[in-house]
Amino acid sequence: MRICITSEGESIDSKIDPRFGRCRYFIIADTDTLEFEVIKNPNINSVGGAGIQSAQLVASKKVKAVLSGNVGPNAFRVLNAEGIDVYTQITGSVKEAIEAYKSGRLKKAESSNVGSKFGMGG
């Protein structure tokens, strides 16, 4: 299964980026093989709409879930409409997050966990 994890770096040993729309990187990982693709987030410095644009980018990669520290309401709406499960308040490394997801230790988010302008400060 393909999932997306927000990351501060380009490897699965990197720390989770707490922002979704303005994270540094998206890591698209296969939970079975741990093979992954790194995507530098083109929306990190967007004036507005970063959450929506990032959600559309991630949805185009045909992932089943997004793991991040925080996801705002606009991104959450887009991901939800695409049938993508969202998991928030994720910390640690990308690899640890993948393992937690695989083992069923994560709780699916029912809504966004931050306001729409959260990521603009970082």
Image (cartoon, grey):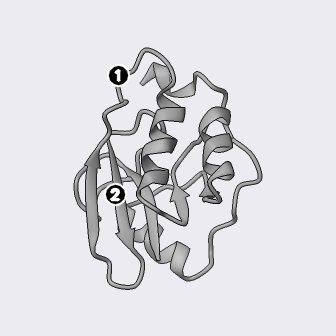
Quadrant for the C terminus, please: top left
Quick one: which residue is furthest to the top in this view?
Answer: 47
The front one of 95 and 34 is: 34
The front one of 119 and 21 is: 21
Residue drawn at 62 percent across, 56 percent down:
86
User: In the structure shown, which secondary structural element does the residue marked by tag 1 occupy?
Assistant: loop
User: In the structure shown, which secondary structural element does the residue marked by tag 2 occupy?
Assistant: strand
Residue drawn at 37 percent across, 61 percent down:
93
User: In the visual, does 42 lie left or right of 16?
Assistant: left
Q: Position of residue 88 (x, y in %)?
A: 61, 52
User: In the visual, does 21 lie left or right of 27?
Assistant: right
**Height in image: 74 above or below 89?**
above
Residue 94 falls in image quadrant: bottom left
**Height in image: 60 above or below 46?**
below
Callout 2: few (<14), some (14-19), or many (20+) C-alpha neighbours within 10 Å? many
- Reading the image, the residue beneath label 1 is 45
Residue drawn at 39 percent across, 21 percent down:
46
- Reading the image, the residue beneath label 2 is 27
Quick one: which residue is furthest to the right in this view?
Answer: 110
Q: Position of residue 79 (x, y in %)?
A: 61, 49
Q: Distance between the Cα atoms at labels 1 and 2?
A: 18 Å
Q: Give, as a three-letter code, the residue at label 1.
A: Asn
Q: Earlier in the sequence, mark 1 or mark 2?
A: 2
Q: Which mark is residue 120?
A: none
